[in-house]
Amino acid sequence: MRLDWEIAKRGWRRYAAYPWATAAGVFTNTVFGFIQAYILLAVFDHRRDVGGYDAQDAVTYVWLAQALLMTVYIFGWQDFALRIRDGSIATDLARPLDPQRYWLAFDLGRAPYHFVFRGILPFVVGAIVFELHYPTPLHVLGFVVSVAFAVVVSFGFRFLYNAAAFWLVDVRGVVTVAITVVVFFSGMVLPLSFFPPWLRTIAEALPFASILQTPIDVWLGKYSGAGVVGVLALQVFWGLVLLGLGRLALRAGSRKLVVQGG
């Protein structure tokens, strides 16, 4: 555990070293928060309820999604793929520390930094301008736990598509498709509750809802009691499944590893 803690601290320090990048990200998230909030509010000019959401729920959803965007790191993580491509993975595999464990610990250190410094301020701006939904203390606790599980699910998926670099010279196509799928089916573009029933059923059967939709719905009080326990258990399930698939991909890729240029 001490080793994991030290690696997690490295994850925090890596992103803390670029405060102006964080500030630019906060500005960007805030701007997109206003754009999306007003788009959804226009929908509620003509109806009072969409998929169980009222206008206050929808606006809260927007600002929470902007707050969690970098926490769950939906866009473009390729660190593991780049180490495979440049041959550094050979050194990683020779070390006594498993690469998947290393990157998971690193990501669990990165996520709190992005939550605190990239996520809270945009949400506060949204709270000042709009009337948002605020949860009970119990739902706040559930939300925090759900966000932690969401980071693990997200990492499991990111590690899996990065592992494609064992077999492909260029993984940019795989990464682009993967990001497109997770953005759409996680609820980043639009809450899954707004989807047609048939598409919502498909989206909820996939692991991506656990990355964004689930923690936000916990905050909004869409689940209570056993319902909260149930969705948290589903996040744990998807986290274990994706980490397990990543483990299989790592094992298979390691057996066929050919370092480019050597």
Image (spheres, rainbow, N blue to C red):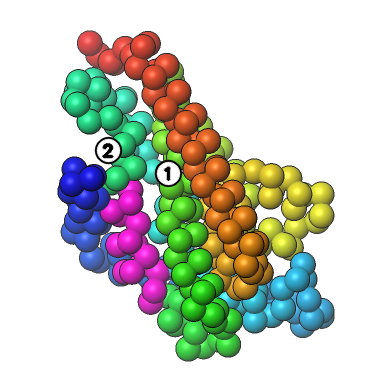
Asked if the stretch drawn in magenta spans residue 8, the answer is no
Which is more toward the observer, 204 or 129? 204
Q: Is residue 136 above or below residue 163?
A: below
Secondary structure, mark 2, is: helix
**Secondary structure, magenta segment, majority class:** helix
Question: What residue span does the magenta drawing correspond to?
Answer: 107-121
Disc 2 target residue: 102
Q: Residue at 42% across / 32% down in the picture?
A: 162
Residue visible at 49% across and 43% down in the picture? 239
Which residue type does callout 1 highlight?
Phe
Instruction: In the rendered view, tell whether residue 244 sits above or below residue 212.
Output: above
Q: Residue at x 34, y 42 (%)?
A: 104
Decide if residue 33 is in sight here: no
Marks 1 and 2, the one that precedes in the sequence = 2
Label 1 element class: helix
23 displayed left or right of 70 = left
User: Observer-nearest residue: 94 or 123?
Assistant: 94
Q: Which mark is residue 92?
A: none
Q: Amino acid at mark 2?
A: Tyr
Q: Residue furthest front?
A: 226
Residue 3 visible in the current orientation: yes
Q: Residue at x 37, y 11 (%)?
A: 256
Within-10-Å neighbours for mark 2: few <14, some 14–19, many 20+: some
Of the 4 image quadrants, the one containing the N terminus is: top left
Is 135 placed above or below 171 here?
below
Residue 111 belongs to the span the image colors magenta = yes
Give the residue pinned by disc 1.
155
Q: CA distance from mark 1 to mark 2?
A: 12 Å
